[in-house]
């Protein structure tokens, strides 16, 4: 039986929560006592007008922070929120560069992230994350966000691949469901360990070394 890993030509990786360890959820919940739980926080975050403006490149850092404080009723001011927000992406999970390097000869790799200039600068300057992929589609440069269909349409057009030849992995089920609805091979994963397990189950493996004549 053919494996899914043999049926795709490209892999789209979400970053935060998949390749990058994130912090900040507990902090946001502490600052927003009216939020019931993490699920409500993420639901409101994805739908937030302030987030959508900022992560599509349409807002300054300061305007974003002030809008978030107002939208979520935070108990801190915009300056304090922004100081904390810079550090929400804590670090790459151990083993990320090695995994991507092993897959790059066999698959086209792309990062597909709802992100912003603050965090993207860290990804590139501190971790050289952009250089681990063949292509990068940070939302603040694309001008679109997951889970919007327009975002995925943009990525597929840029890669010049049909949806069924592309694998997408994300830790947000809303994004996964949106990609699947477009025909992309989409899988929900939790953390880097979950990513490894999912790739193994799909038969997504490194290219076999060539045997010299």
Image (cartoon, rainbow, N blue to C red):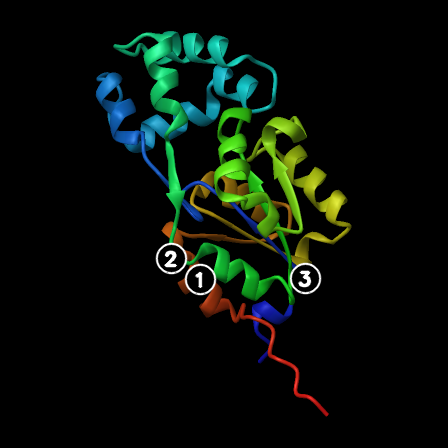
Query: Can residue 171 be seen in the rendering of this structure?
Result: yes
Q: In which quarter of the image is the C terminus?
A: bottom right
Q: In which quarter of the image is residue 87?
A: top left
- Residue 194 is labelled as 2
Compare marks 3 and 2 and give the one earlier in the sequence. Answer: 3
Residue 202 higher or lower than 163, as above or below: below
Q: In which quarter of the image is residue 94?
A: bottom left
Determine whether label 1 and label 2 are within 8 Å by CB: yes
Q: Which residue sits at x=38%, y=23%?
A: 85
Q: Which residue sits at x=39%, y=54%?
A: 192
Q: Distance between the residues labelled 3 and 2?
A: 21 Å
Secondary element at tag 3: loop
Viewed as shown, does residue 151 lie left or right of 171?
A: right
Residue 205 percent location from the top left of the image: 54, 70
Q: Which residue sits at x=45%, y=69%?
A: 201
Compare marks 3 and 1 and give the one earlier in the sequence. Answer: 3
Viewed as shown, does residue 118 lie left or right of 185?
A: left
Secondary element at tag 2: helix
Residue picked out by circle 3: 9
Q: Which residue sits at x=46%, y=19%?
A: 48
Viewed as shown, does residue 199 lie left or right of 56?
A: left
How many callouts does the rendering have?
3
Secondary element at tag 1: helix
Residue 195 higher or lower than 35, as above or below: below
Query: Can residue 190 be seen in the rendering of this structure?
Result: no
Residue picked out by circle 1: 198
């Amino acid at each position: 039986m053919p494996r899914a890993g043999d049926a795709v030509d490209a892999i789209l990786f979400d970053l935060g929560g998949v390749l990058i360890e994130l912090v900040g959820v507990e902090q946001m919940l502490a600052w927003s006592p009216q939020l019931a739980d993490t699920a409500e926080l993420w639901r409101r975050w994805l739908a937030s007008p302030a987030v959508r403006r900022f992560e599509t490149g349409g807002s300054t850092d300061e305007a974003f922070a002030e809008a978030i404080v107002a939208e979520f009723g935070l108990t801190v001011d915009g300056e304090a929120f922004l100081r904390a927000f810079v550090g929400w992406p804590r670090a790459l999970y151990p083993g990320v560069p090695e995994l991507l390097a092993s897959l790059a000869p066999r698959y086209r790799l792309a990062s597909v992230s709802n992100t912003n200039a603050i965090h993207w600068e860290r990804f590139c300057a501190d971790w050289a994350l952009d250089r681990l992929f063949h292509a990068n589609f940070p939302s603040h440069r694309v001008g679109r966000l997951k889970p919007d269909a327009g975002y995925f349409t943009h990525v597929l057009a840029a890669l010049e691949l049909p949806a069924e030849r592309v694998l997408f992995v994300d830790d947000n089920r809303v994004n996964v469901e949106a990609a699947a609805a477009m025909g992309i091979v989409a899988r929900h994963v939790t953390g880097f360990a979950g990513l490894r397990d999912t790739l193994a189950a799909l038969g997504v493996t490194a290219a076999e070394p060539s045997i010299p004549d």
